[in-house]
């Protein structure tokens, strides 16, 4: 989730707010963000944030004839520079770490196969 979800009330420097986001693809994840309005210089607002992500209880995906049972969780860091007038981001960077297991069931396997999983990503958006 690279775009910022703002609170309904106007915020000032030093303020913080929380937002929960749920995605279904590529993984069913619930992410809880806490944003902080760090600074304002000229017409650019710097936001920072932290958060956690986790697959829900009994999270599954079907892909290629296999059922995957997901048990992943982790943390993230977030930094953004946004236009103070429009709220559109100039630049957003999100670092995320997920760890856990994926258990794969398939008719070709005698029993579910548990695969340890570690996903580390850095996603960067820059406006043109």
Image (cartoon, grey):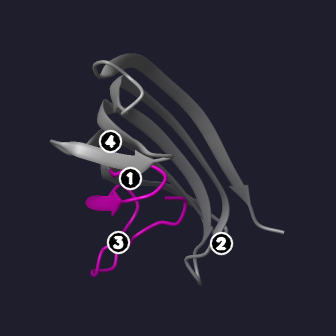
Looking at the image, is 93 positioned above or below residue 7? above
Q: Earlier in the sequence, mark 2 or mark 3?
A: 3
> What secondary structure prevails in the magenta region?
loop
Residue 60, picture quadrant: top left
Element under label 2? Answer: loop
Q: Earlier in the sequence, mark 1 or mark 4?
A: 1
Left or right of 33 on screen, residue 97: right
What residue is rendered at 55% in x and 47% in y?
79
Distance between the Cα atoms at labels 1 and 3?
Answer: 10 Å
Q: Which residue is mark 2?
A: 43
Q: Are marks 1 and 3 in contact (CB under 8 Å)?
A: no
The residue stretch that appears in magenta: 1-28
Q: Earlier in the sequence, mark 4 or mark 3?
A: 3
What residue is rendered at 15% in x and 42% in y?
57
- The circle drawn on residue 104 is none
Coordinates of residue 89 in the picture (x, y in percent) = 63, 67
Coordinates of residue 106 in the picture (x, y in percent) = 37, 33
* Residue at the right extreme, as displayed: 128
Element under label 3? Answer: loop
Q: Are marks 4 and 3 in contact (CB under 8 Å)?
A: no
Q: Which residue is mark 3?
A: 11
Q: Which residue is mark 1?
A: 36
Q: Earlier in the sequence, mark 1 or mark 3?
A: 3
Report the front residue among 98 and 107.
Answer: 107
Q: Earlier in the sequence, mark 1 or mark 2?
A: 1
What residue is rendered at 38% in x and 52% in y?
36
Distance between the Cα atoms at labels 1 and 4?
Answer: 18 Å
Distance between the Cα atoms at labels 4 and 3?
Answer: 25 Å
């Amino acid at each position: 989730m690279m775009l910022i979800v703002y609170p309904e009330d106007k915020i000032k420097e030093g303020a913080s707010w929380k937002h929960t986001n749920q995605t279904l693809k590529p993984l069913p994840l619930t992410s809880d963000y806490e944003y902080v309005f760090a600074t304002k210089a000229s017409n650019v607002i710097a936001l920072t944030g932290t958060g956690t992500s986790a697959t829900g209880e009994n999270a599954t995906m079907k892909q290629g004839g296999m059922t995957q049972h997901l048990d992943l969780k982790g943390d993230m860091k977030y930094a953004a520079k946004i236009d103070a007038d429009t709220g559109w981001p100039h630049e957003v960077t999100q670092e995320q770490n997920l760890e856990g297991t994926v258990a794969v069931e398939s008719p070709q396997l005698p029993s579910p196969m548990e695969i340890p999983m570690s996903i580390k990503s850095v996603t960067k958006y820059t406006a043109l």
